[in-house]
Image (cartoon, rainbow, N blue to C red):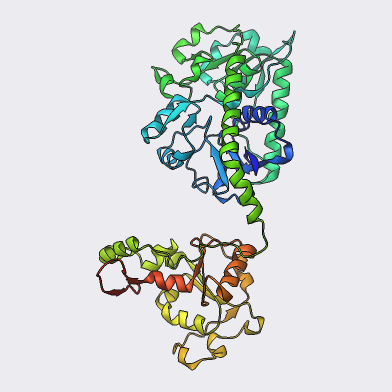
Amino acid sequence: MKYGLLKFSCYKPNLGDYMQLAGIVQAYKRLGIADEDIVEIERDSLSTYDGEYVILPMTAAFNANHGVKIFPLSPKIIPIFIGFFTADESVAKAIARYEKFGPFGCRDLVTMRMMQKQGVQAYMSGCYSIGFTKRAKTPQNGKVYLCDPPEELIPYIPKEYMEDAVVLPKPHRTMKVPGYHKENEEMGKEYVKNLVAELKENARLVITCRLHMSLPCIAMGIPVVLAHKCDSGQVEECRFAGLDKIIRVYKPSEYASIDWNPEAPDIEWLKEKTIRLAMQKIEEVKNSQGGGYELSDYYESTEKQVYYSGMKASYLSEQQKQYYVRNAWKLERTIFEYIVHKNLEKMHLVFYGAGDKGKWAIRRYYDYIVRAAEFSIVDGNEKKWGKGINDVLTNNDWDINASDNYKIENPRILKDIEKERLVVIVTCDRYYSGPGADIGNMLIREYGLEEEKELYFLDKLNNSMDMHLSSTSAPFYFLDGF
């Protein structure tokens, strides 16, 4: 089992995100966790992580952005919710589903109250950007640094400060490579590392409106003037709520009374409590669940058959079938689309297996095939590649009596199809043993498919589609594309 750190490799990251990792890094060091046991996981794709089981402190901001795949979390992630922020109601609801990993430690009071609104236990743990170590000495001829101060504040800053002030770039930076890329991650880390070193060595004052500039500086013993952009009591409702216990947050109406020679508050006691909380949470998870996940990592590393829901004979429960029977008249999609969680008009439907059962499946599901955006049939036997499905007919009883003579293709085409569009049906008997199981496990191992996400088995699909409600006195229902 591993220990996780979030990483941020997008094209335009907020470099303040890296600041939030400081307290977790300190916790890992003090727990004696070796570097080789720490893995970095992209914050914006936590749902697709597929490495070893990992304990992951969720110290970041989480919002519902287009193309971001954070929730639901990968089953390989054991989350620790401390120091996190969200201002998005839909994200708060998604996080609340992980109540068994609670209570939830929130970065600020706004996040805490939003989580409590979801009916779960939450408390304010504070921000883990206070985890930086305090500098040993104050520079004799230090510099004033400006990090994104409000424009309205500029006229109030003493002239002697402005003459020699160092203006820092805004925290939202454009990196080298569009999309998500390791170069972006390394560039962001390097910038933050150099910035922290420079401030610790040279800063006598930092003027900013940024949370993740002010808290790290205070932790390092650097005086800060923190000026917010809002007024009329809004500070209590914004992202600084609760954190103003550490440092005064000046509103626009208070700019004229700013103390331009502040002392850095001593927060060593608070830093210690915050880091100890992280250590405690990490140890609790390790001691209560670590052994089981380590065993599972060991067994899951086998090269033998990969588990894929075993003897479960249907993709629908009896209760779900009853629902579909009762509501068939008002459903907007076919039962097939509900099972595979994709719309036919956007689907690339693929049948794996060009034998007799494959030809039968074409007849059985022909209405879906013609509606799908694309359809392919593949087979592992290269002698069939390029031939029509009717040309390899071995049993006239299965003749589909249709003009469509679909060409049989190499299964490698699966690698070129977007998983969001892909639905693969293994058209072989015996999903739990024999050729069906062999093909299924090959598709899982070599192509990264997941059952009930991109991968389905014909036997189970038929059992799902045939609405025989054994738990009721209802008659046999066959819902063929309603």
Residue 443 x, y percent position in the rendering: 60, 67
Q: Is residue 332 left or right of residue 431?
A: left
Residue at 66% x, 81% y is: 382
Q: Quadrant of the N terminus?
A: top right
- Quadrant assignment, res 307: bottom right
Name the one closer to the observer, 343 or 361.
361
- Quadrant assignment, res 35: top right
Residue 68 visible in the snapshot:
no
Residue 85 x, y percent position in the rendering: 50, 32
Residue 121 x, y percent position in the rendering: 42, 31
Name the one closer to the observer, 412 or 396.
396
Residue at 53% x, 70% y is: 432
The number of numbered discs placed on residues in the rendered structure image is 0
Residue 259 visible in the snapshot:
yes
The relative height of residue 363 versus residue 449 in the rendered view (above or below) is below
Residue 315 x, y percent position in the rendering: 43, 64
Q: Quadrant of the C terminus?
A: bottom left
